[in-house]
Image: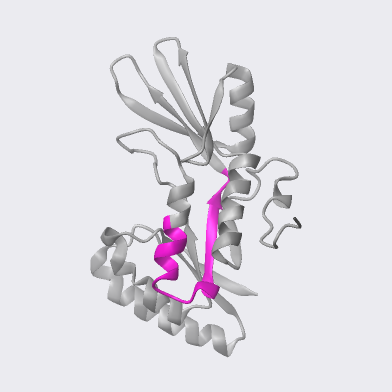
Amino acid sequence: DGINVDIELLPEGAARDYLEFMRELSIACRTDDLFLSVDCYVPYSYNAYYNIKELGEICDYVVIMCYDEHYAGSEEAGSVSSLSYVERGIDESAAKMDKNRVIIALPFYTRVWITDANGKLRSEALSIKKAKEWITEKNVPLEWKEDIGQYYGVIQDGNEKKEIWMEDEKSMEAKMSLLREKGIQGVAAWKLGQEPQGFWSILNLEEKAS
């Protein structure tokens, strides 16, 4: 049993109080024999005040949210979780803390990016299950992008251009292969119920038989 803390969009001015809260919580968790994990963004200079190094000492596990590389409100269309973004999440976190305490969280969703006739961009989040249905319904041609580790598709739908960077079995297996290669001990996902049937068989960190 344990507690997972997910405090996002933390103001930089609250960082000291946040760390003190996590210290106090860790003491209470140890007293009650509970695991403590905390969710963090992929490390960049602009979110360094989360202090992943100290969180890695305070908590049993740090969960790196390797998604929303491109998010609702992004100025350009792109992948929610490219292979290179996941790799950055692994490498940057492992450089700051014990790699055995790192858990990589992967998305069970993607986005359809829509550019209207005036060039205005918006997006709609879809579960992997719904994205598969959308691709079939719209007859979207897909092309595997090796550098991104995902299928990419684009169609013209009336006056709108629609793009998708697809998270599916092949892209997830590419991510899991990277996690095994990097020696990561834990994997998580956001969120349960968005994955296709049988998808969990891919989320296996054990080395595959050759």
Could you tell me which residue is drawn at 40 percent across and 58 percent down?
A: 42
206 on left or right of 183? right
Instruction: Give the farthest residue toward the front.
Output: 210
**For residue 5, above or below residue 115:** below
95 on left or right of 168? left
Residue 44 at x, y = what percent?
32, 59
Residue 190 visible in the snapshot:
no
199 on left or right of 31? right
Q: How is the image coloured?
A: one colour
21 and 155: which is toward the camera: 155
Q: Quadrant of residue 176?
A: bottom right
Residue 158 at x, y = what percent?
44, 9
189 on left or right of 163? right
| Quadrant position of the N terminus in the picture | bottom right
**For residue 65, above or below residue 37:** above
Residue 120 at x, y = what percent?
30, 23
Q: Quadrant of residue 122?
A: top left
| Quadrant position of the C terminus in the picture | bottom right
Task: Give the magenta-colored segment's residue range.
Answer: 88-108
Instruction: Give the farthest residue toward the bottom.
Output: 31
Residue 200 at x, y = what percent?
71, 51
**For residue 55, above or below residue 27:** above
Residue 101 visible in the snapshot:
yes
Is 115 contained in the magenta span?
A: no
Instruction: Give the farthest residue toward the left.
Output: 13
Q: Quadrant of residue 209?
A: bottom right
Could you tell me which residue is drawn at 31 percent across and 76 percent down?
A: 17
Is 90 contained in the magenta span?
A: yes
Could you tell me which residue is drawn at 63 percent across and 43 percent down?
A: 194
Could you tell me which residue is drawn at 47 percent across and 62 percent down?
A: 90
Numbered label tally = 0
185 and 119: which is toward the camera: 185
